[in-house]
Image (tube, coloured by chain):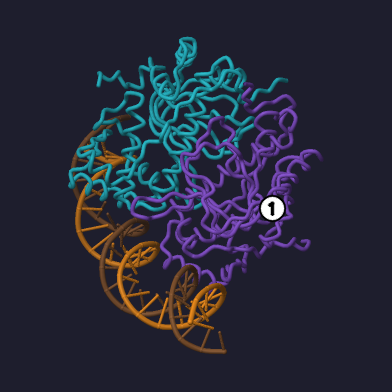
Chain colours: A cyan, B purple, C orange, D brown
Amino acid sequence: MSRLPALDPEHPDQAELVIRRLSQYSDLAPYEVELLRSLSETPERLSAGTELIAEGERLETPRLLLAGWACRQRYLPDGRRQIFDFILPGDIYGLCLRPQAVALCNAVTLTRATISNAAALGDAVLSRPEGYPGLTTACLMSASTDEAYLLGQVVRIGRQTAYERVAHLLLELQYRLSVVGLATHDFMPLPLTQEIIADALGLSIVHLNRTLQQLRRDGIVEVRGGVGRLLDVSRLRSIADFRAPHVTARRVESGMRLHAASA
Amino acid sequence: MSRLPALDPEHPDQAELVIRRLSQYSDLAPYEVELLRSLSETPERLSAGTELIAEGERLETPRLLLAGWACRQRYLPDGRRQIFDFILPGDIYGLCLRPQAVALCNAVTLTRATISNAAALGDAVLSRPEGYPGLTTACLMSASTDEAYLLGQVVRIGRQTAYERVAHLLLELQYRLSVVGLATHDFMPLPLTQEIIADALGLSIVHLNRTLQQLRRDGIVEVRGGVGRLLDVSRLRSIADFRAPHVTARRVESGMRLHAASA
DNA sequence: CGTGCACTTGATAGAACTCAAGACAGGTGG
DNA sequence: CCACCTGTCTTGAGTTCTATCAAGTGCACG
């Protein structure tokens, strides 16, 4: 595997991430790649804990997370939090293929982050999909994949033990990060507190802490200092039952439409 | 509240259910209602445990559940099962707004059921949305709502106690059934075994059984013999933190498109 | 050098699971 | 009509898992 590019959130020269991410789903034409590259021209820096989307808000313009991590989450009235999923560098968020869509939950940054407006991508895919068949296909498949990860999350918290949940989540993150070149087969950045991981997995902080220690003592994974190391990938896989979503890439036929307000 | 129609799965004269269900999202023109009504003309009887959709299968034609209950689910290799959500009478399933979509999980009947092909609805919404603005809006909002319920499921199993989970699920089911006229404010059919409910809520059968007993002893709900009775709705609500999805009905503009293969 | 945050540890309580067995009902075949 | 299934529900006992409470460590930062 080739050398990874710099990950520093202060230097968001990488529209490369989203290009890699969407390229896995569909071949992109040079002008489509160019469109993606142009998205990073107006970066915006955000501190950790910034709300990206509020529940109920109209999803007007999609945005691109260039660097840093975010998540979608919801609180119960008494303060319990559930994290639905993580938004990783190179991910698009706030892009809904349904017109008039409304955000179903909050999205918030978990670290310092750099985002940029991706209205150009939204226009391309929603209004002129026939002109951007590669991007359109890629965004559709990306949306399907996101949904598949959400189903994986349901199985994880509904039917797996704490030990299995952690294993499963780490494999998911390693896989998603490696797609955009941010992780190797056994190493990844993991800028999450144990509290955040616990809230994603439906566990208490203390129990997550002990579970992580157990996984390390067992020589399976090591999570520390903002990075994760997979010490025994095959054992990890047999514990987690993680399956990468099967991405059956099929090109959008020319003339295929999403939706367009022709007003 | 008026008398409910007969619920007998052997007499599926009710395309009325899907009409009621979609009408909540958008005003439907008479010809749109007529299209929905025509869907029930070719009913098909299925026994409990019939697979409706297999994971990975191409979603070609949407179908309508006229009577009976179904669910979407996944098994772990060792036999543990997680149910993602329930498909209720009047629900459309297998309708994906993304072209070339593939089923992300299995769907299977939980009771004897009656289904019918809803290709006409799929055509209308996917190929000629401008001709069916009411149906199109309704299907979009229905899809959003389904996704909202899935997020509710994540919070339920991730951050609620067994007691709260049961309360939350029962309120969700009561709400969804009442929309199509199959439940009153405190009564609903509930043709599920405790094993099924347990697999939906991420609990063991035994523990679910004891939790149901506790809820009954507390005078909150009674689940028995295929029906559910809400004995103390306000207490139930305060336990469950169930929020009906906020359906901000906005009409699709004329000329708005989903996607259409123009080949 | 104090302060705050994340992480860690120990002790304990509570929640939930497993195993095992019995009760009950509906359906079937003799 | 009865005996016998089978599936579902129920109950008890014991164990495991996970949460809670409380305190302490370590580090980064002002």
Label 1 environment density (alpha carbons within 10 Å; few <14, some 14–19, many ≥20): some
Q: Is residue A174 above or below residue B187?
A: above
Name the chain letter of the residue that bears numbered label 1: B
Compare residues A154 and A13 and report the one nearer the observer. A154
Q: What x and y, as percent, mark residue B2? A: 78, 61
Q: Nearer the viewer, residue B236 or A243?
A: A243
Q: Is residue B251 left or right of residue B87?
A: right
Residue at the image point whose x is 82% and y is 40% from the top: B30
Residue B95 in picture, x, y percent from top left: 60, 39
Q: Which residue shows up at 56% across the image and 20% down it? A: A119
Q: Nearer the viewer, residue A258 or B172?
A: A258
Instruction: State whether residue D12 is above or below residue B201.
Output: below
Residue B43 picture location, percent across and down: 67, 51
Q: How many marks?
A: 1
Residue denoted by label 1 = B179
Task: Specify the quadrant of the image occupied by residue B202.
Answer: bottom left
Q: Note whether residue B42 is visible.
A: yes
Q: Look at the image and tell me whether residue B168 can be seen.
A: no
Q: Is residue A137 left or right of residue A243?
A: right
Quarter where residue B140 is shown:
top right
Give the residue type that dot 1 points to: Val
Above or below, B205 against A22 in this view is: below
> Where A40 falls versus B117 (above or below)?
above
* Quarter that holds the C terminus of chain B: top right
